[in-house]
Amino acid sequence: MPDLLRFRTIIYWFWVLAIPLVSCKKTQETTSEPEFQNVLDLSVIPQDAYNLDGFGFSDLGAWHGFALPPQDSIEYAGGFSGPLLMKTYGRWIAKSLCQLNILDQNLHNIPFEPSKTKIYSLPGRLVQELETENLRIKLTLIFVDERTSLQSTKIQNISKEAQRFYLSWNGELFERNIDFQTSTHSFSFQLPDSSLLETAFSIPLKSVVLKDSILDVLAEKTELKKGENMRIEFVIRYSFHQDFKDQNLTALRDLLQKPELLDQQNQKRWNKYISKICTPEMTIAEKQLGVKCLQTLVTNWRSPAGDLQHHGIFPSAAYQGFYGFWSWDSWKHSVAVVQFDPFLAKEGIRSMFDYQNKAGMVADCIYFDSTENNWRDTKAPLAAWSVFEVFKATKDTAFVREMLPKLIKYHQWWYSDRDHDQNGLCEYGSTDGTLIAAKWESGMDNALRFDETKILQNSATAWSFDQESVDLNAYLQKEKEYLAILCSINGKNELAKIFNDEAKELADRIRTYFWHPEKQWFFDRKLNHGVFLEAFGPEGWTPFWTGIASKEQAASLVKIMLDTSRFNTKVPLPTLDAAHKKFNPLKGYWRGPVWLDQAYFGIEALRNYGYEEEANQLTQKIFQNAEGLLENAPIRENYHPISGKGLNAKHFSWSAAHLLLMMEKE
């Protein structure tokens, strides 16, 4: 029997046996703290399948998500925008797949009262409160597993007499010519890419019709006596071919027969998340920012699917180009995520090492379809830092034992494939000999320091820039220190000593070789003749963050970093000296915008060297002046240092991660 047919047969027998979830008992609800209501504006009605503006709600690693209709959009009240499907790119399946309508006994629509409509988000859920003349309705949407969302509809008769009505749901689909199947309690869409979108109800359906992209669902007539209430559940499950064999009767029964338990589990999990990142000392605004960071990271969480073998986090599901896991993004995400979800933090690291090749290289990014993985370059080496921070938070020695051989192999790869002259100082490069891939490897794609760079061949599969980068070597030096610690944890004391000795030697070299005594900054240098590439950027404070800089060097760096004409801008620590003639935040991706990872490294460096007050001042400038951080606007990929305007992708994960880290340290 084919998988899909087998699954539909299971569904049929489930609904034959299922007990309808309609209750006439009043239930007491738990409400979340009002201070976390609408910390993110998630309202949008998508006008086409591929416009991701306004998207921002998913959970538990699901590959679909939703948005809210705008508060004043009574036309779409009763439904949640979407779902948005996220397999290989983002596409809305519908403006609203299942929008609730209340119909009278003649099947005429009973309108919701605009003045009594409330549409809002809370941590981990979307909510609508609606009223007709005689009925009070509350809709709640949560996720209950990595493939499934659950929508609960609670209806109370608030009139003085019995009410008879029909429940109806309709949807306006963007896609046409898809395989559509129905049963007494469910309907499903088999999509051209072999994924399955299925909706199953806790009550029998009178009719389900899809015609000309309009979906109409009608339930049997309902009667509620005075004061009585009822609830109806339905699930939306978005799954892939490899999942079909795992779907079974027990799982479906659990989802639709225990909605209150699932709701309690959701609230408990989110309350635990919040308790991990919000402290009593925080202001309400800071707590709200923390919750916004949480929601951003969790919405971008994807579970194992396709060729992705472990959980991980997209840079942003609200941007079409970011539907995969990137290596240095993943390292950074895990350092923050371990605060509230150690499992997800470990998984994010594992996901990238799943594709470590025989030489030790880790791919730049990996996708649902592994044929699209980018092996042209890797990213800056921060993996050992990430594993160390996860260990520090969890004390999980088994995780260290699992990751250590892979980390060592990755570290050694840099010296075998990215040290052109074999002098112990590495360069960024590529596997295909292209400059663009080598720039991607740095993570700072169009940084000023790479304007005159050339590419040199090391071997048949390895090329290097003709310059040694200070940030790369500072990262590698710090990785040696972390590897030494991780080796000691794992009982490999001789290897730990080797890494410690190498770390000390490399720190001495970086402290002198990359330091410009006249300019008082760390710069990249050209191979052979060693000319400094005098571009003042965040690579200059990387040895400050990693602890390599001497106290005297640190004092000079701080003076430049705190200069209001250079780096202490409205939103501080831009990626290029604001006084430089090529400073251009609007057009230069890494030539002026403030990236919060680099800002965090700079602020953390200040703390590490005792400049606590200065670090707090810069942190507060970011919180106060980066557009929308303390409002309900999305967290952006980067920010304009002069105007504070948010730039590029919305709902950006590593920005959220580093904001959490700044809040933790402040």
Image (tube, rainbow, N blue to C red):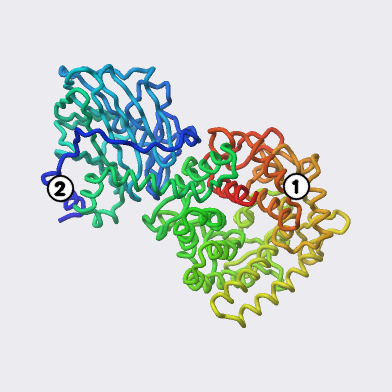
Marks 1 and 2 sit apart, C-alpha to C-alpha, by: 63 Å
Q: Which residue is mark 2?
A: 14
Q: Is residue 321 visible?
A: no
Query: Which class describes the residues within 10 Å of circle 2: few (<14), some (14-19), or many (20+)?
Result: some
| Left or right position of 28 against 286 | left
The answer to whether marks 1 and 2 mark residues whose Cβ atoms lie closer than 8 Å is no
Dividing the image into 4 quarters, which one contains the N terminus? bottom left
Residue topped by disc 1 = 614
Pinpoint residue 145: horizontal percent, then vertical percent. 33, 50
Pick the residue in front: 117 or 198: 117
- Left or right, 199 with respect to 460, comes to left
Q: Position of residue 180 (x, y in %)?
A: 22, 39
- Amino acid under label 2? Phe
User: Which quarter of the picture shows residue 407?
Assistant: bottom right
- The quadrant holding residue 138 is top left
Q: Tag on residue 409?
A: none
Residue 486 seen in the figure: yes
In the rendering, at what x and y percent does residue 442 appear?
A: 64, 56
**Residue at position x 58%, y 40% from top?**
286
Relative depth, front residue between 469 and 25: 25
Q: Residue furthest bottom?
A: 494
The amino acid type of the residue labelled 1 equals Glu
Q: Is residue 354 above or below residue 11?
A: below
* Circle 1 or circle 2, nearest the eye: 1
Circle nearer the N terminus (1, 2) = 2
